[in-house]
Image (cartoon, rainbow, N blue to C red):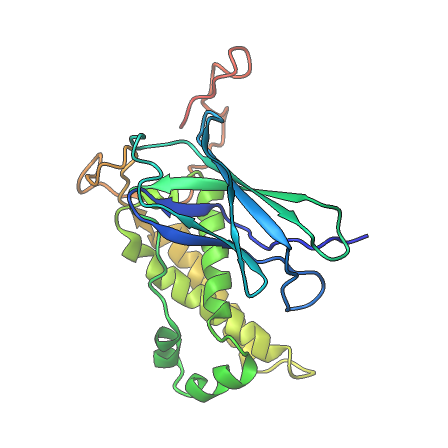
Amino acid sequence: MTYPAPTFDLPRFVQKGRGETLDLPVRSGSPSVVAPASATYSLYDSDGITVIAAAVATVTNGIATYALASTFADAYTLPQDPWRESWALTGLSGAPSPMTFERQVQLCRVAPTMLVTPETLFRMHGQWRTQLPKSRANYNEPIEDAWSELIGRLMGDGHVPNRILNNHSLATIHKYWSAHIVCRDFATDVPSDTKWAKLADDYWKRSQDEYEHHLGLQLDQDEDGVAEEPGVLDAAEPPLYLTDVPWTDYPATRTRRDW
């Protein structure tokens, strides 16, 4: 049996000192949300210590929401290892009660932000100004999907997105990644290869070339707003070692050294 569930493929990035409303839409085989009867929200720090304990959440238009106060992390200094949030939802139709959903939370000095909008894509192809609204009810979706995939790629390559000072450096990759998704969707509407299929391939290659060969990251690992090495940019792709990987203390002491 398939139970209702949320959809997320990234951690939640929350900014220290900023209040915001968190939400957890839950769906089951349909775009419509499955409304809980009630919900609670809990937040735990990187040591598993409770920051917020089963606070009552609000259900608005079928979606559980919680108002996170701006003071929630006042007792903490950055940087922080990943935190964890937990939602307990009761009364979900067709599901046991309560259902608990957990998600990694990254506490940030400044949360990463998308710098690509539909207007960015419209400047690439003027006809998309009319085509995109006709193709999707929410034509920001290709941009959101590309962003999730890009941030996931960065994290898989060992980078914490909120510790990248030059966030603008991701914009070109994000633009072409988004355009790839748009063209891929347009290509599926026809039975044979078209210009959209070729453009989808071209934009994908461009996005990956930008990521692998041209992306330079200005890192701020201690999240104090100042680069560790001003003027030095790190490649996004991890180095490829053709001989033994330079790690020595793992697993004997359970400590793995970075390279």
Residue drawn at the location 33% of the way across and 54% of the way down: 214
Residue 48 vs 132, above or below: the answer is above
As drawn, 171 above or below 249: below
Q: Nearer the viewer, residue 206 or 173?
A: 173
Q: Is residue 9 left or right of residue 154?
A: right
Residue 235 appears in the figure: no
Counting from the top left corner in percent of width and height, residue 2 is at 77, 54
| Residue under the image location 34 percent in, 42 percent down | 108
Residue 236 location, quadrant: top left
Residue at 50% from the left image edge and 69% from the top image edge: 141
**Which quadrant holds the C terminus?**
top left
Q: Quadrant of residue 76?
A: top left
Measured as percent of width and height from the top left, residue 220 is found at: 27, 38
Q: Answer whether residue 92 is visible to the viewer in this image.
A: yes
Above or below, 21 against 121 in this view is above
Foreground residue among 22 and 46: 22
- Image quadrant in which you'd find residue 251: top right
User: Residue 168 location in percent, x, y?
Assistant: 28, 57
- The image position of residue 10, as x and y in percent, is 50, 49
Q: Nearer the viewer, residue 223 or 12?
A: 12
User: Number of labelled discs?
Assistant: 0
Instruction: Say which residue appears at 54% left-offset and 11% top-offset.
Output: 252
254 and 74: which one is in front? 74
